[in-house]
Amino acid sequence: MQDKRTPPSPSKVEDLVDDEMIIEDDIEEVIDLNDPIFESSSSSDENENPRTEDLMQEDIVDDAIRVFRGHKSHHTVFCCSLSKNGNLVATGGEDDKGYLWNANTGEGILSTDDSHNDSVIFSDFNYNDKYVATADMRGKIKLWRISDKICVWETALMNDINWIKWHPFSDILVTGVETGEIYMLKTRKDDCKIFAQGSGIKSEAGIILPDDFCSRENVICILQDLHKRGNNNDHVEVAAFCKDPTFPVAASATVTSETYGKIYIWDISKQSLRHEMDQEGGVTKLVWIKASIFFTSGLDGKLRCFDARIGHCLRIFSGHKGALYDVCISSDEKKAITVSDDGTARLFDISSIHC
């Protein structure tokens, strides 16, 4: 049968030669792109995208070797500590509770339940790990015997607590309150002594120093120098001395914003600035360990390790999804515990950090 179709013009023939020609006899199947199967496939892909994005957001690197969950979700955990042997963890939080944990298994050992009426801001072990003390912002302090999980002593101060510390060699607590008084509490004896009468100006921080550790002039010089160098928006959040007497330096850290802070390393003998370092996220706490090594907890949820001799960050530990508020290093300097806005405590292995 004669093909009556108009033959293509020479130019169109060239186009057909250039493109791949489709011959009817070669067609095996005609696919209708309007078929519902393609619509459902497209719809399925669209539905999967949000879930994929969620999974990607949840896929955060977690360097922790143990995560402790027990405090109420979305409630800040304010404080943490490790027992001297590193086997126990104590925490306290915004949910008005303190917890004692097994550091090796993550199992909960003790809960203060409804013993406190405000945020627990202190939860720490005494010098021989026989007791753990918890304290809330309103001034209630309780002492728990670890062996049988019983509260053996408690007291209630008349003012809000700003800070509290164990004496390093006895069952004595020292605390500073909102109105400026400094109390010394002999636990289990109901003996209380006031070191300083309140002046109406709150006691912000305190520490018990060994004899002849430093002089008042050194501390004043460091803080005054920092005030001159620092940005007007900087707030000095922490200051701490290196533990090694052969390396006489101190570190201080500032908070400019939630996304920015600075760390200063001061040479005490020369009374001069040795290093100045930036940190993403303001610094909430700074803890020295080995000769020149210290750790910082940040508002960006990161735990960082620095070498003060060279002025560089050695490592960053991730895992938390909220700002960090406390960090504690074990006595053998192999573990670090942190607590956060995300309602968890996390234990990190820091044994690989070398001087």
Image (cartoon, rainbow, N blue to C red):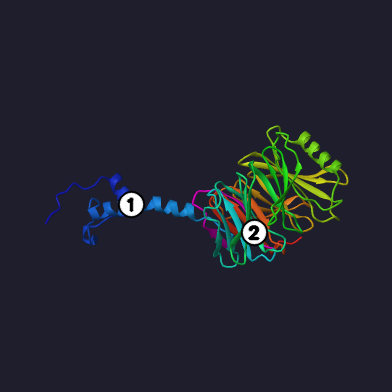
The residue positioned farthest toward the left in the image shown? 1
The boundaries of the magenta stretch are 65-83
Q: Position of residue 210 (x, y in %)?
A: 82, 53
Q: Of helix, strand and loop, which one carries label 2?
A: strand
Give the CA distance from mark 2 to mark 1.
Answer: 82 Å
Q: Position of residue 305 (x, y in %)?
A: 69, 54
Give residue 19's mark.
1
Q: Is residue 289 visible?
A: yes
Residue kind at label 2, given as amino acid type = Val
Q: Is residue 65 visible?
A: no
Indicate whether residue 202 is drawn in magenta: no
Quadrant of image for the N terminus: bottom left
Q: How many marks?
A: 2
Q: Relative to the observer, which residue lies in front, 342 or 44? A: 342
Q: Relative to the observer, which residue lies in front, 77 or 198? A: 198
Q: Is 91 displayed left or right of 201 in the figure?
A: left
Q: Which residue is mark 2?
A: 132
Structural crowding at the residue carrying mark 2, measured as other residues with C-alpha within 10 Å and reported as few (<14), some (14–19) or many (≥20) = many
Q: Is 318 displayed left or right of 200 in the figure?
A: left
Badge nearest the viewer, 2 or 1:
2
Indicate whether 72 appears above or below 162: below
Give residue 9's mark.
none
Structural crowding at the residue carrying mark 1, measured as other residues with C-alpha within 10 Å and reported as few (<14), some (14–19) or many (≥20) = few
Residue kind at label 1, given as amino acid type = Asp
Quadrant of image for the C terminus: bottom right
Whether pointer 2 and pointer 1 mark residues with C-beta atoms closer than 8 Å, the reply is: no
Q: Is 214 displayed left or right of 131 in the figure?
A: right
Q: Of helix, strand and loop, which one carries label 1?
A: loop
Q: Position of residue 354 (x, y in %)?
A: 74, 62
Q: Relative to the observer, which residue lies in front, 354 or 28? A: 354
Indicate whether 277 appears above or below 348: above
Q: Earlier in the sequence, mark 2 or mark 1?
A: 1
